[in-house]
Each structure stands twice: as structure tokens, then as C-alpha cells.
Amino acid sequence: MITGLSTAAISAAGARWRITTPSRRLVAILIGAAASVLSNALAGRRRRQTERELSALSDTTLKDIGLSRSEIEFVARHLDIPRTCDSNAKH
């Protein structure tokens, strides 16, 4: 799985290029665009995963953490989840 670290590495690689010719400039723009698309895709994946996990909780559990079922989508969209967070990782 590609992580936020990989996105940062792609962005850094594009920033290191010395923009002197139009072709190098185009490559740098394409690298930046690819990094942006990847970042947005990963953010969407984290949002959908958060929605699935919260939706699986009972109403009582949601109430215990201060949420109602109608707030799940809002929380998933606006909650800042670290890129390195992996719910499948063993702790």
C-alpha cells in the first residue's frame, strides 16, 4: 500500500528537479498532479473506512462516544485522521 510518505517522496522528487527546460517543467507538473491525485484517493479511502467502522457500531456505542448515526458522514469527512493510521495493523 502506498502511504503518505510515498506521496511526500513523489512531491519532493518533483521539487528537486531544476526547472530549466519546458519538458522538465512538464514532468514536474505531472509529478505534482500525480501526487495530488494519490493524496486525494488515499483521503477518500480513509473517509470510507471511517464511515464503515462507525456505521458498524451500535447506537448505544455511538451515544457513548458522543455521536448519533446522522453525524457519521460529517465526522468521517471532517475528522483529521493521520496518514500512517492503519486499523489492520497489529498493536
Image: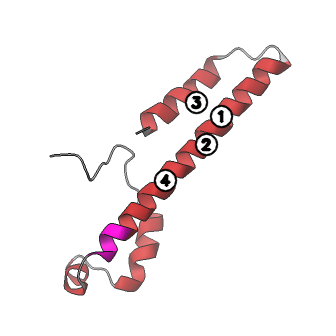
Q: Read off the residue under disc 4.
A: 43
Is most of the magenta stretch helix, strand or loop?
helix
N-terminal-most mark, 1 or 4: 1
Q: Position of residue 52 (x, y in %)?
A: 36, 69
Q: Secondary structure at mark 2?
A: helix
Could you tell me which quadrant the N terminus lies in?
A: top left
Q: Residues within 10 Å of mark 3 (few under 14, many from 20)?
A: some
Of 88 and 47, which appears nearest the observer? 88
Residue stretch rendered in magenta on the structure: 52-56
Residue 81 sits inside the magenta stretch? no
User: Real-space Cα distance between discs 4 and 3?
Assistant: 16 Å
Q: Residues within 10 Å of mark 1 (few under 14, many from 20)?
A: some
The answer to whether residue 40 is left or right of residue 88 is right
The answer to whether residue 65 is left or right of residue 25 is left
Q: Hey, which quadrant is residue 13 in on the image?
A: top right
Q: Amino acid at mark 4?
A: Ala
The answer to whether residue 32 is left or right of residue 86 is right
Instruction: In the rendered structure, find residue 32 and report the number of the disc placed on it.
Output: 1
User: Real-space Cα distance between discs 4 and 2?
Assistant: 11 Å
Q: Read off the residue under disc 2.
A: 36
Q: Residue at x 44, y 61 (%)?
A: 47
User: Real-space Cα distance between discs 1 and 4?
Assistant: 17 Å
Q: Residue at x 31, y 48 (%)?
A: 85
Q: Position of residue 73 (x, y in %)?
A: 45, 74
Q: Secondary structure at mark 3?
A: helix
Q: Residue at x 20, y 85 (%)?
A: 60
User: Real-space Cα distance between discs 1 and 3?
Assistant: 6 Å
Q: Amino acid at mark 3?
A: Ser
Q: Read off the residue under disc 3.
A: 11
N-terminal-most mark, 1 or 3: 3
Q: Hey, which quadrant is residue 17 in on the image?
A: top right
CB atoms of marks 1 and 4 within 8 Å:
no
